[in-house]
Amino acid sequence: TPPSVTVSVINDITGYSAQATVPADGTVFTVPDLFQNSNIDERGEILATSAQLIQFVEGVFCSFNRDTTIVPLN
């Protein structure tokens, strides 16, 4: 079993947050797949103002990507 990574996303305006834990095996996950039906899901839109890794594995690179924009979480 691969180690896992947990990311927390927070909406500082509403105070809501959600967490997702995924395997650290190179699998790509979409933000909606991770956070749909959570506190930060506003009718199908994931609304967050910040994110942080709360469980991570040394040497694993985590990021949010959209087209050519890459936001590292490490």
Image (cartoon, rainbow, N blue to C red):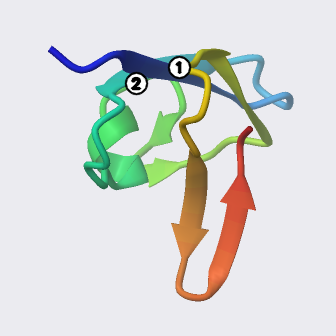
Residue 72 image offset from top left, x and y in percent: 72, 53
Of 59 and 29, nearer the camera is 59
Please indicate whether residue 42 sits to the left or right of residue 26 in the image: right
**40 over 56 or under it: above or below:** below
Is residue 17 left or right of 23 when viewed as pictured?
Answer: right
Three-letter code, disc 1: Ala
Q: Which of marks 1 and 2 is nearer the N terminus?
A: 1
Q: Is residue 22 above or below residue 15?
A: below
The residue drawn where x is 46% and y is 22% is 5
Quarter holding residue 54 = top right
Front residue of 26 and 31: 26
Expressed as whole percent of the image width and height from the top left, the position of residue 20 reads 41, 23
What's the residue at 36%, 31% (across, down)?
24
Tell me where residue 52 sits by quadrant.
top right
Please rate how many residues cluster around mark 2, counting C-alpha atoms within 10 Å: few if below 14, some from 14 to 19, many from 20: some
Q: Name the residue under label 2.
A: 38
Q: Going by the picture, which residue comes out furthest to the right?
A: 13
Residues at badges 1 and 2 in contact (C-beta under 8 Å)? yes
Q: Count the marks: how many?
A: 2
Residue drawn at x 54%, y 20% is: 57
Position of the N terminus by quadrant:
top left
Residue 55 screen position, x and y as percent: 57, 11
Q: Is residue 44 visible?
A: no
**Vertical arrangement, residue 44 with respect to residue 18, above or below:** below
Front residue of 13 and 72 = 72
From the image, tell me which residue sits under label 1. Answer: 18
SS under mark 1: strand
